[in-house]
């Protein structure tokens, strides 16, 4: 009885060992490589997999994206500057069989490959280009590494340059150059600002002068128009005044002429008025006096007045003193 129990226990243990060695679980991010008697047999997908104990063996390959850190190394650029460069390589497995059987240590292999190609790519560039063309370097390295690692069953997703460190003296020179460039830009910017300010000021002065000249022109035009209108109004007023004066004088002359004809004046009265008019003419400030051309008629009128004065007065007071000159012929007053 005791021997039977021991035998059953041994059999159960052996069954457990067989089950433990014959059942494998493949995770979702893994692929399984089944080897039978030391030879590749099949690739299995994730899940519960059964193998033949002690005959089959399963190798799990991680299919997730992996990261390889490329350590810093010194690289000489085309302008003979030694720089320290390091990078990061991202890859993922595409064929677990080739990744397991074609390369012994993939991470070491891809690290050395990345270092070699970094020297080649950056060595063909100048320092300024290397510092400003990281995207170009990353693309070139990715293409080179992707082609080289294709036979290993991997795909290089991307390559990133982490640092490119020039020597300290070059860094100081770059800082001085950058400071000089910033100083130059500041001076250029200030000069451009001064120039633009001067141009703007000159343009403003030009516009102000144009507006001032336009204002003066408009003022002169308005003044000329006002003076013209004033002259026209003055001329119109003067014409109206002269017309009124002429009409008044004409009316006065007509009245005087009518009164003279209505009063029927004698030649003696006309001669007396004639003499009074001459006295008024001679009483002016003029240095020259123009007498009428009909002097004979004037002297005749004067003689007639002298005869009138010689006639005896009504009270018999005697005769008036004789006038100078002979008897004046009868003559009509000058017209």
Image (spheres, helix red, strand yellow):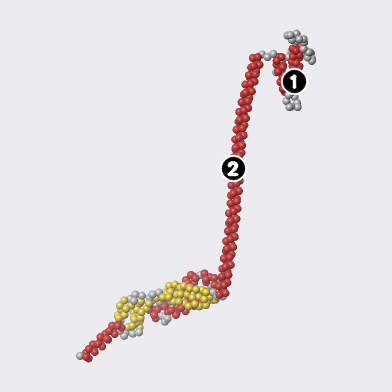
What residue does disc 1 label?
293
In this view, the residue in front, 120 or 190, is: 190
Please indicate, yes or no, whether residue 113 appears anywhere in the rendered image: no
Residue occupying image coordinates x 53% and y 72%: 125
Which x, y percent locates residue 110?
45, 78
Residue occupying image coordinates x 58% and y 67%: 180
Vertical arrangement, residue 128 with respect to residue 306, above or below = below
Q: Secondary structure at mark 1?
A: loop
In the picture, measured across the screen, residue 308 lies left or right of residue 89, that is right
In the picture, measured across the screen, residue 160 lies left or right of residue 233, that is left
Residue occupying image coordinates x 74% and y 15%: 301
Q: How many numbered badges does the structure rendering display?
A: 2
Residue occupying image coordinates x 30% and y 81%: 23
Vertical arrangement, residue 329 with respect to residue 160, above or below = above
Picture quarter with the N terminus: bottom left
What residue does disc 2 label?
218
- For the residues labelled 1 and 2, the Cα–Cα distance comes to 60 Å
Which x, y percent locates residue 33?
35, 79
Q: Secondary structure at mark 2?
A: helix
In the picture, measured across the screen, residue 39 lies left or right of residue 187, that is left
Residue 166 lies in what quarter of the image?
Answer: bottom right
Vertical arrangement, residue 232 with respect to residue 12, above or below = above
Mark 1 or mark 2: whose residue is earlier in sequence: 2
In this view, the residue in front, 118 or 20, is: 20
Which x, y percent locates residue 32?
34, 78
Which x, y percent locates residue 96?
38, 77
């Amino acid at each position: 009885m005791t021997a039977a129990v021991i035998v059953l226990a041994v059999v159960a243990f052996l069954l457990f060992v067989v089950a433990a060695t014959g059942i494998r679980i493949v995770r979702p991010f893994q692929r399984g490589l089944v080897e039978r008697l030391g030879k590749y047999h099949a690739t299995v997908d994730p899940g519960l997999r059964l193998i033949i104990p002690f005959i089959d063996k399963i190798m799990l390959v991680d299919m997730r994206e992996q990261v390889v850190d490329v350590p810093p190394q010194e690289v000489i650029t085309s302008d003979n500057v030694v720089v320290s460069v390091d990078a990061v390589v991202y890859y993922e497995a595409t064929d677990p069989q080739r990744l397991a059987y074609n390369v012994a240590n993939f991470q070491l292999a891809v690290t050395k490959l990345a270092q070699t190609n970094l020297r080649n790519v950056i060595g063909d560039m100048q320092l300024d280009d290397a510092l400003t063309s990281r995207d170009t370097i990353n693309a070139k390295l990715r293409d080179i590494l992707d082609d080289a690692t294709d036979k290993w069953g991997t795909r290089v997703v991307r390559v990133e340059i982490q640092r490119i460190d020039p020597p300290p003296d070059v860094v100081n020179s770059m800082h001085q150059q950058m400071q000089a460039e910033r100083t130059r830009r500041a001076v250029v910017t200030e000069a451009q600002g001064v120039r633009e300010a001067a141009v703007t000021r000159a343009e403003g002065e030009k516009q102000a002068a144009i507006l001032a000249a336009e204002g003066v022109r408009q003022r002169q035009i308005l003044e000329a128009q006002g003076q013209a209108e004033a002259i026209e109004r003055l001329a119109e007023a003067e014409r109206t005044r002269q017309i009124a004066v002429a009409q008044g004088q004409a009316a006065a002359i007509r009245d005087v002429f009518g009164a003279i004809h209505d009063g029927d004046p004698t030649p003696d009265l006309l001669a007396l008025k004639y003499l009074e008019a001459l006295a008024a003419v001679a009483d002016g400030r003029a240095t020259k006096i123009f007498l009428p051309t009909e002097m004979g008629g004037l002297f005749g009128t004067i003689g007639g007045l002298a005869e009138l004065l010689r006639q005896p007065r009504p009270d018999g007071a005697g005769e008036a003193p004789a006038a100078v000159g002979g008897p004046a012929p009868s003559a009509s007053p000058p017209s």
